[in-house]
C-alpha cells in the first residue's frame, strides 16, 4: 500500500460531503475516475465518494447538511446526493461476491475498509482514493501506472475479465481516451476472454464503443485492441492486415481505417462512418494482374454496416445518416455549384451531412499515399463551393422553390406522389439553370414539361 501526500483539487461540495460523513464517524474518500483524471490534469466528469457509512446513514447525514439525496442504487449501496446542482455518487465500501453471469456480481457485501473496496475495481489507475487531509491512497500501483501511462488490471487479469466482460471493453475505451498502452498480461487476458463480451448488453457495448471512437488516441487504441474488438464487431476481422495491393494505399485496410477515424471530426456520425466506410473491402477484393480492385466496395460496406448497426444501440435516424456517408464516401462530386446542389438534393438538403461527407473524404484521402493528393484537393474545393452555395440564396431543396404542391395541383395534377415528382423535376431544372426560381417561370416550365418531366 502506498499513501502519498499528493493532492488533487476537490470542489467544495465534495469536500462538504466528505467532511459531514467523517464528522459523523464514517471514513470517506474520493475514488475512481475523478482521482485519475484530476491527477492527469484533465477535466473531471463527476466526483464519486466511497464511504464506510451504510446508504441509510449516508442519506441521513447528508440530508441534515442540506443535500438532496436520491436512492439511485441502494442494492449496491449507492445514493446520489446533490447540492446546488452538483451531483455526487456515494457508495458504501463494498466487495463483489461471485460472478456467474460474466457481468454482474451475484451479491455485493459491504466491507469495512477502503482497501477492500479498491481491490474490486477494474484497473489500477481507477483504484486510487484521495482525501483532502490524508492524500492519495494507492494499494495497487496506480500512481506508477499513471506515470507510465499504462492500463493494468487490478489483481489477476484473467480472473477480473472472467468476472465481468464489460471491463474488457472499458480497457479499450480508456486506451483511446487516455492514450495509455495496455500492459501485456492485461491485453493478453482481454484477448483470451473477449467472448465474455457476449454477456454484455448492446447498450453498454455501444456506449463503450462510442467512447473509444470519440477518444483522442483512437488510432493507437484501434490498432492495439483490434483482436479484442473483433468479439463485438466481427465484421472488421477481415480488414485486419488486409493488404490493399494498390499504389494508392500505404496501409492495410484496418490501419487505413484507424487513421481515417483518427482524422475525422469527433462526432458519433463521423467516427462511426469512418470506422465502417471500407468494411466491405476485403469482400469486394479481386486481383487483376498485380493490381487489386475493390469495385463497388461501398455497397458491401453498407450491407455489412447495416447488420452491424442494427445490433448496436444506435438510433435508426443516426444509423441511416452513417449508412449514407458509407454509401457515398467514394462518389466523385465535382467542385462546381451545380454538382454540389445536386448532391445536396440527394441528401435531402442536409448540409451538415454534406459537411460530414466532405470531412470523411478528406480523412480518407489523408490516410492514403501521395497519389491521392488530388482527392484531398477536391475535398477542399468541395468545402469552398459548399460555403458559396449555402451563403447564397440558391435552391437545393423543394422547400426553397418559389412554387409548392398547391401550384402543381392547380395545373390539374391530382393529390398524390405525382405532385412530389413534379416538384423534384422543377428543382432539378432550377439547379441545372434551365429555369429561374420564380413563381411565373416555374409554373410555365412545369406545365410545358408535364408529360416528359
Ligand atoms: P468515466 O466516468 O470517465 O467513464 P470512470 O473511471 O469514472 O470513468 P465510471 O463508470 O464512472 O468510470 O466508474 C467509476 C469507478 O467505478 C471506476 O473508476 C472504477 O473504479 C469502478 N468501476 C466502474 N465500472 C467497473 C467495472 N465494470 N468493474 C470494476 N470496477 C468498475
Ligand atoms: Mg465516472
Image (spheres, grey):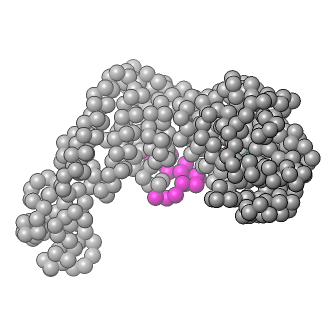
Q: Quadrant of residue 366?
A: top left
Q: Residue at horizontal 60%, vertical 36%?
A: 42
**What is the quadrant of residue 395 in the picture?**
bottom left
Residue visible at 37% across and 30% down in the picture: 365
Q: Position of residue 82 (x, y in %)?
A: 69, 59
Left or right, 191 with respect to 104, comes to: left
Q: Between 246 and 41, which is closer to the camera in this rendering?
A: 41
- In reply to whether residue 1 is colored magenta, the answer given is no
From the viewer's perspective, is 281 left or right of 121? left
Q: Quadrant of ligand 1?
A: top right
Residue for point 22% across, 73% down: 405
Q: Can the viewer see residue 84?
A: yes
Eyeballing the image, is 67 above or below 260?
A: below
**Quadrant showing the C terminus:** bottom left
Please tell me whether the stretch drawn in magenta is mainly helix, strand or loop: helix
Q: Is residue 306 magenta?
A: yes
Would residue 346 be found to the left or right of residue 126 on screen?
Answer: left
Image quarter of residue 159: top right
Residue 129 x/y as whole percent: 78, 39
Where residue 400 appears, as percent x and y from the top left, is 22, 63
Tell me the residue at 33%/26% (across/down).
372
The foreground one among 109 and 162 is 109
Q: Position of residue 44 (x, y in %)?
A: 63, 43
Q: Quadrant of the N terminus?
A: top right
The answer to whether any part of residue 104 appears in the image is no
> What residue range appears in magenta?
301-317
Amino acid at each position: 500500500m502506498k499513501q502519498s501526500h499528493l493532492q488533487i483539487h476537490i470542489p467544495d461540495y465534495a469536500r462538504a460531503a466528505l467532511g459531514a460523513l467523517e464528522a459523523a464517524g464514517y471514513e470517506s474518500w474520493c475514488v475512481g475516475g475523478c482521482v485519475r483524471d484530476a491527477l492527469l490534469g484533465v477535466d473531471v466528469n463527476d466526483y464519486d465518494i466511497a464511504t464506510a457509512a451504510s446508504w441509510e446513514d449516508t442519506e441521513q447525514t447528508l440530508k441534515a447538511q442540506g443535500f438532496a439525496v436520491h436512492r439511485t442504487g441502494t442494492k449496491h449501496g449507492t445514493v446520489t446526493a446533490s447540492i446546488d446542482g452538483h451531483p455526487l455518487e456515494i457508495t458504501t465500501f463494498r466487495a463483489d461476491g461471485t460472478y456467474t453471469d460474466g457481468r454482474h456480481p451475484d451479491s455485493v457485501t459491504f466491507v469495512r475498509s477502503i482497501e477492500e473496496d479498491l481491490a474490486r475495481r477494474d484497473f489500477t489507475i481507477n483504484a486510487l482514493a484521495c482525501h483532502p487531509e490524508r492524500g492519495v491512497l494507492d494499494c495497487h500501483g496506480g500512481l506508477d501506472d499513471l506515470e507510465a501511462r499504462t492500463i493494468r488490471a487490478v489483481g489477476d487479469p484473467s480472473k477480473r475479465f472472467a468476472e465481468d466482460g464489460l471491463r474488457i471493453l472499458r480497457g479499450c475505451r480508456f486506451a483511446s481516451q487516455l492514450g495509455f498502452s495496455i500492459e501485456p498480461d492485461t491485453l493478453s487476458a482481454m484477448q483470451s476472454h473477449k467472448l465474455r463480451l457476449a454477456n454484455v448488453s448492446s447498450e453498454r457495448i455501444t456506449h463503450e464503443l462510442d467512447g473509444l471512437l470519440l477518444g483522442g488516441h483512437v488510432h493507437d487504441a484501434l490498432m492495439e485492441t483490434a483482436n479484442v474488438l473483433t468479439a463485438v464487431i466481427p465484421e472488421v476481422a477481415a480488414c485486419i492486415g488486409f493488404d490493399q495491393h494498390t499504389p494508392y494505399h500505404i496501409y492495410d485496410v484496418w490501419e487505413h481505417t484507424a487513421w481515417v477515424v483518427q482524422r475525422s471530426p469527433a462526432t458519433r456520425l463521423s467516427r462511426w462512418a469512418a470506422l465502417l466506410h471500407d468494411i466491405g473491402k476485403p469482400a469486394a477484393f479481386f486481383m487483376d494482374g498485380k493490381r487489386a480492385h475493390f469495385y463497388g466496395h461501398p455497397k458491401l460496406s453498407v450491407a455489412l454496416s447495416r447488420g452491424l448497426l442494427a445490433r448496436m444501440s444506435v438510433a435508426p435516424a443516426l444509423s441511416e445518416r452513417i449508412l449514407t456517408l458509407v454509401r457515398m464516401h467514394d462518389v466523385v462530386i465535382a467542385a462546381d455549384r451545380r454538382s454540389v446542389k445536386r448532391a445536396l438534393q440527394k441528401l435531402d438538403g442536409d448540409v451538415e451531412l454534406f459537411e460530414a461527407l466532405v470531412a470523411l473524404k478528406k480523412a480518407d484521402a489523408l490516410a492514403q499515399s501521395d497519389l491521392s493528393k488530388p482527392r484531398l484537393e477536391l475535398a477542399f474545393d468541395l468545402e469552398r463551393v459548399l460555403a458559396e452555395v449555402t451563403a447564397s440564396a440558391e435552391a437545393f431543396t423543394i422547400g426553397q422553390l418559389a412554387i409548392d404542391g398547391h401550384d402543381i395541383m392547380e395545373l390539374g395534377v391530382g393529390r398524390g406522389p405525382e405532385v412530389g415528382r413534379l416538384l423534384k423535376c422543377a428543382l432539378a431544372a432550377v439547379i441545372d439553370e434551365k429555369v429561374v426560381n420564380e413563381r411565373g417561370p416555374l409554373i410555365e416550365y412545369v406545365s410545358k414539361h408535364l408529360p416528359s418531366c
